[in-house]
Structures are given as C-alpha cells and as structure tokens.
Image (spheres, rainbow, N blue to C red):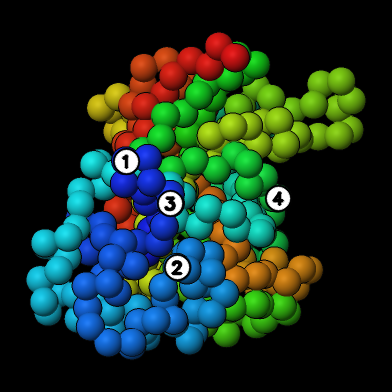
Amino acid sequence: MTSYGICTFAIADGSAGAGISVAGKVVSIDELIDTLPGSDWDALRGRSVFDLLQEWSQVKGVISGLVNAAVEKNLIAECGRAPGSVKMFPPIMKPQQIFCTGANYRQHVIDLTLDAGVGPEGLSDAELRTWAENMMDERAANGEPYVFMKPVSAMAGAYDSLPLPSNTTQPDWELELGVVIGREAFRVSREDALSYVAGYTIVNDISARDLIPRTDYKMLGTDWFRSKGQRGFFIVGPEVVPSEFVDDPMDLKIKLEVSGKLMQNETTADMIFDIARQIEYISSYTPLLPGDIICTGSPAGNGTHYNRFLRDGDIMTGEIEGLGVQKVHCVADHD
C-alpha cells in the first residue's frame, strides 16, 4: 500500500480543494477521479478534507484505492505539483474544536522551571533541577493532562507568513505533533483511544509569552485567548498522514530551526502524558468530534529558554518525522 497524506490546496487563484500528497507532490482528488475511469471513487468527488473525516472509516479504503491506482498509472508523477508551486491551506480548514495540552514535555517543563527560577526558596540550581525532575515524575505517575482550547480563526497554512502583532514583544514558537480525530470519541478508555485517530499532522502553537499572565487581576492566572489566539498563531500542515502510515507516534523526531539555527530537537517520547492518555482525558469531559485537532504539547527549546523570540524577517522551518515540513516567514504586522 502506498503511503500518502491528505491536504487542502489551490492552484493559482482557484478555490481550495482536497488533495493527495505522495512523495513530495500534491494532486487534486477530483483531478485523479476525472483521469481514472470508473465510478469506484465517486464517494470522494467534491469533498473537503473535513467532509472526508466525517466518514473516515468508510472512505479511507476508497482513498487508498485511488492512490494505489494513480501510482500504478504514474499519475502522481504526471499530474502532481510541488507544494511550493500551489497555495497550501491548513489541511482541515475549519475543524469544530482545537484542543491543546500544555506543559506536556518533561524536559521542556524542567527548563521552564529553571529559567524562571520557580520553586522552593533557597535551592541551588542543582537542587532546583532535582526538585523539578521529581515534580515531573510525580505528575506523570499521578497527575492529569492540562488542556485548553484555541480558536479556529488563528489557523494558518504550513507556508503562510506569520504576522507578528505589535501587542507582544515575545512571540514564541511551539512545534507540536497534531492528532486528528476520525470518529466521535466520548468517555473512551486509554486502551481504545488510538482507534479514534484518523491521522497526524504538524502544528505550531505560536504563543505571546508576555501576554500569558494576567497582571490586572492575578487570581485569573493565565490568559490563553490573547496569548495564543491571535491571527496566524496556529500553523497547521502541510498534510494529515493517516495513522496506518505512522508506525509509532510516540517515537517521532521533532525539529525546528529559526533562521537557520536549530532550536527544538526532541522526540515525542518525552511526552509526560501520551496521546492515548490525552484522548482519554479530553473525552471524559467532552466529546471529541471527527476533524478535531489535539495539539499534544511542545518539546524543549522554545524562545523562552534562549531568551530569543521571533523577529521580523525570521524564517521558521519545522519538521516532524514522516509528516512533512513547514516553512513560515515572520513579518511585522503594522495593522
């Protein structure tokens, strides 16, 4: 079976439509249907990626058949286009819900603790590190995921420019593994959780670090709306790779460079709460719906650690093993 991703793109000024990504080329699903004879693929015609995910268990076999037939007839090579030659949109343009699991990588949280000097008073750096490590081990054993939501209006494509708003001086990167839900999940067990996953994608949960704490009324704590919900602050794609083509989502390499400098270099194995535990936790409170995205947390190496934040002209290049590459140009937003 040929591995593939599903994506959303447009040619020139055309309308966005669902596509297939194979070996670095994208091709329209409708174009393949028009080229291949027969009615085997009619269930896919005119459907968005979101539409396909609503019936994922029924259509994924049809998509695989279409891809295999197209590869056999060399249509991907003949009709496919490089992602850089088309307009790539977020693969799921309007998911109903976006969930984010915060503080979910062990080394990341330890680094944040040390960088901010948060902990019991009077500890040396070595003692503070030991305290943070013990705290993370205790949380992993007996704690729960920490989840918040992100607005759909923050979404952007994998090659879009990122407008850096003037209301923050600390825009930061958080490259993450995105989990895409393929059927409704409500109060599911950890053991069954991964059977509800349609596939995986790359997300970058941009965060304005200086806007996270509320200073006007400190008891409010954190403000995820203004710090993470601004335009372009949720970069998704370039594609969703079906789960059957991801051997172990808990052992994927994650890398992010900012203007040529490697900042994040970790694997998903450093998660405190794995994907199945996150699905179990979220679905215990609210149903997960087909097309929903779960952002599973960001590994160590954020701008906070380096005291280096995104600037006008920066280029972020983010990659997760087997899921493609994002390349985003940062521009000052003067609106």
Sequence-first disc among 4 and 3: 3
Q: Residue at x 26, y 57 (%)?
A: 26
Please state which amino acid type lies under the numbered disc 1: Ala
Along the horizontal axis of the image, is 22 left or right of 163? left
In the rendered image of this protein, does residue 126 appear above or below residue 37?
above
In three-dimensional space, the C-alpha distance between marks 4 and 3, rounded to whole angstroms, equals 29 Å
Please state which amino acid type lies under the numbered disc 4: Phe
Residue position marked by numbered label 2 in the rendering: 46
Q: Are marks 4 and 1 in contact (CB under 8 Å)?
A: no
Label 1: state its secondary structure. loop
Q: Whole-percent x and y of residue 125?
A: 53, 30
Q: Quadrant of residue 296?
A: bottom right
Q: Quadrant of residue 96?
A: bottom right
Q: Residue at x 67, y 81 (%)?
A: 188
Which of the two marks, 4 or 3, is nearer to us in this view? 3
Residue position marked by numbered label 4 in the rendering: 148
In the rendered image of this protein, does residue 83 appear above or below residue 273?
above
In terms of depth relative to the viewer, which is nearer, 65 or 57?
Answer: 65
Residue 225 visible from this viewpoint: yes
